[in-house]
Amino acid sequence: MKLDIDTLEWGQSEMEISGDLSLELGEGCPQSVQVEGALAVDNLENRFHLKGNVKATCETQCGRCLETFTFAWKAPVEIMILRNIDRGEDQGDTLVLHQSRGEVDLADAITECVSLAYPLTTFCREDCKGLCPTCGIDRNKQSCDCKEEDIDPRWAALDNL
């Protein structure tokens, strides 16, 4: 995932993105992810603007039933590479890289975009029933006879809202 800014032609072009990235999202989150997609590249003299979406895929656990499944999500990517331009220039939410020549390694910037787009919780499917809080049975595979916990009477007034 490198872009050679010395040999890139003027104007617009497209860059294919494909490969594995290491994520550091913490315990219980995926450690590696496969990404693929294409970025539009605008070569504007001393600026290189890359924009597009990448599809990220990884193995992770469902937040309800704890089953491992393949999860895919789209991550928006917008990167600005500045050559010989003042470092104090503000680009808003765009990631800004400063490099005057040679190949620019985009792996860290794309990793950041993919990490930011990863949801807080993932579910194997929308209608996942999860685990029984009493006996721990996966409610998607079998049912149990556990009694729903009675609500504390001090909180009963909230049911009327």
Image (tube, helix red, strand yellow):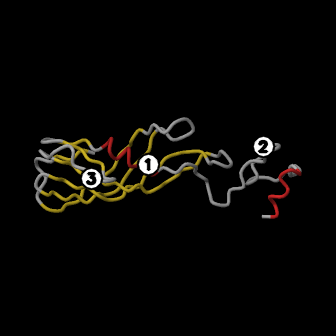
Mark 1 and mark 3 lie on one chain; the one further toward the N terminus is 3
Residue 76, percent from left and from top? 38, 56
Residues under numbered marks 1 and 3 in contact, where contact means CB atoms less than 8 Å apart:
no
Please state, as top left, top right, bottom left or bottom right, where the C terminus lies in the image.
bottom right
Judged left or right of residue 104, residue 121 is: right
Mark 2 residue element? loop
Mark 1 residue element? helix
Residues under numbered marks 3 and 2 in contact, where contact means CB atoms less than 8 Å apart:
no
Foreground residue, 128 or 83? 83
User: Which residue appears at 75% of the width and 53% of the height?
Assistant: 141
Q: What residue is pinned by disc 1?
A: 116
Q: Mark 1 against mark 3, which lies toward the viewer?
A: 3
The answer to which image quadrant residue 103 occupies is top left
Q: Which mark is residue 136?
A: 2
Q: What residue is pinned by disc 3?
A: 91
Q: Which mark is residue 135?
A: none
